[in-house]
Image (spheres, grey):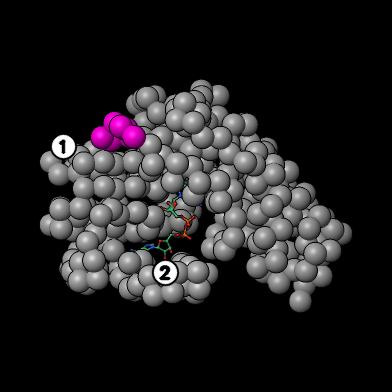
Amino acid sequence: MVLDNLCRGRAEYLDPVRETSPGRIHFSNVDLSDRDATTAAFAAAAQIGVIDEVWHLAANSDIPAGVMDAGVDLRDTFMTTFSLLECMKAHRVGVLHFASSSAIYGDLGNVPLHEAIGPLLPISNYGAMKLASEALIAAAAESFLKQANLFRFPNVVGAPATHGVILDFINKLKVDADHLDVLGDGTQQKAYLHVSDLVDAMMHIRRAAQLPKIFPINIGPVDDGVTVRFIAHAVTARVRPKADIRFGIGNKGWIGDVPKFYYSVERLRQAGWTPSRNSADAVCHAIDQIATQEGFAAGGSHG
Ligand SMILES: NC(=O)c1ccc[n+]([C@@H]2O[C@H](COP(=O)([O-])OP(=O)(O)OC[C@H]3O[C@@H](n4cnc5c(N)ncnc54)[C@H](O)[C@@H]3O)[C@@H](O)[C@H]2O)c1
């Protein structure tokens, strides 16, 4: 059963799964921040079969929107976690996989971000509500959860894309084919993981035996990432090779943007998983996929 209010996702994203597993996917349009609606959706899911585990991926994914209006992340990033935990408790569902984020760490500069570091002081409401969700999940593990995997994603890229720097650049180049205006000076440097590797890593951890009951784990590539400048050049080369790139000022794209972070993936390595693509490969592959999604044939023509 897939629950989503489609504020950003689209029901047709499930079509490939429907084709490979006919009749096995049920979709319900539900606002997961609404406890009554989530309760009704769980009751409907329980009619279909036993609920063994929950994968909680719903959240606000527009970090600047959450900085402008703190209510956005309270509702979509935190209250979704609250409602789901209440329903899991009522239905005695003991296993939760949670999409957390590197944003919980805040801006720690050159300090490698590993799972045991603290204090955690996020710099966006999004990061704050992800951290608050982790805290609520930890408390639930004390009373009814049997296993909670807190997957801390880096920047994830791939298709279908609903948001993110690559889609933003492509959309800008659709409007103005001659110029690409970049937020910040382009030196922001982050680790990028392709969504196919992300799914593979989470399934690897899910299969692992004898994990701690609450298991925070960074998921990311083994490298230090690529800059926004690299992405701007690669997107332009793919969709508008003649466009002029104009960089802004300062090393932050927006309030709440962490300009650089170094992600420790030692715990993931010890769990026996390594990615198939590094940050640069993941970004270039995703650029090609998202350009195709947005109607750019190879070579830069827009159909
Ligand atoms: N993409 C990244 O780089 C990244 C990085 C760190 C963490 N994450 C986390 O991974 C998860 C998936 O992110 P994504 O990048 O695919 O973003 P996305 O916006 O494409 O997916 C989030 C989904 O949640 C749904 N949603 C939002 N509020 C909801 C609500 N109140 N009720 C029901 N559904 C709701 C949206 O419609 C959307 O389909 C999110 O939890 C996000 O915070 C993503």
Residue that appears at 23% across and 38% down: 138
Question: Whole-percent x and y of residue 227?
Answer: 67, 40
In depth, the one of 107 and 38 nearer the eye is 38
Per the image, label 2 sits on a secondary structure element best described as: loop
Can residue 249 be seen by looking at this rendering? no
Residue that appears at 69% across and 44% down: 281
* Crowdedness near tag 2: few (<14), some (14–19) or many (≥20) residues, C-alpha within 10 Å: few
Residue that appears at 41% across and 57% down: 60
* Crowdedness near tag 1: few (<14), some (14–19) or many (≥20) residues, C-alpha within 10 Å: few
Per the image, label 1 sits on a secondary structure element best described as: helix
Q: Ligand 1 is found in which quarter of the picture?
A: bottom left
Magenta range is: 209-215
In depth, the one of 133 and 1 nearer the eye is 1
Residue position for label 2: 7
Query: Is the stretch drawn in magenta largely helix, strand or loop?
Result: loop
In depth, the one of 193 and 273 nearer the eye is 273
Residue position for label 1: 142
Asked if the residue at label 2 sits under 8 Å from ligand 1, the reply is yes
Was residue 113 drawn as part of the magenta stretch in this picture?
A: no
The N terminus - image quarter: bottom left
Residue that appears at 48% across and 42% down: 201
User: Label 1 to label 2, Cα distance in Å?
Assistant: 33 Å
Question: Whole-percent x and y of residue 221?
Answer: 58, 36
- In the displayed image of the protein, which residue is found farthest to the right? 242
Mark number displayed over residue 49: none
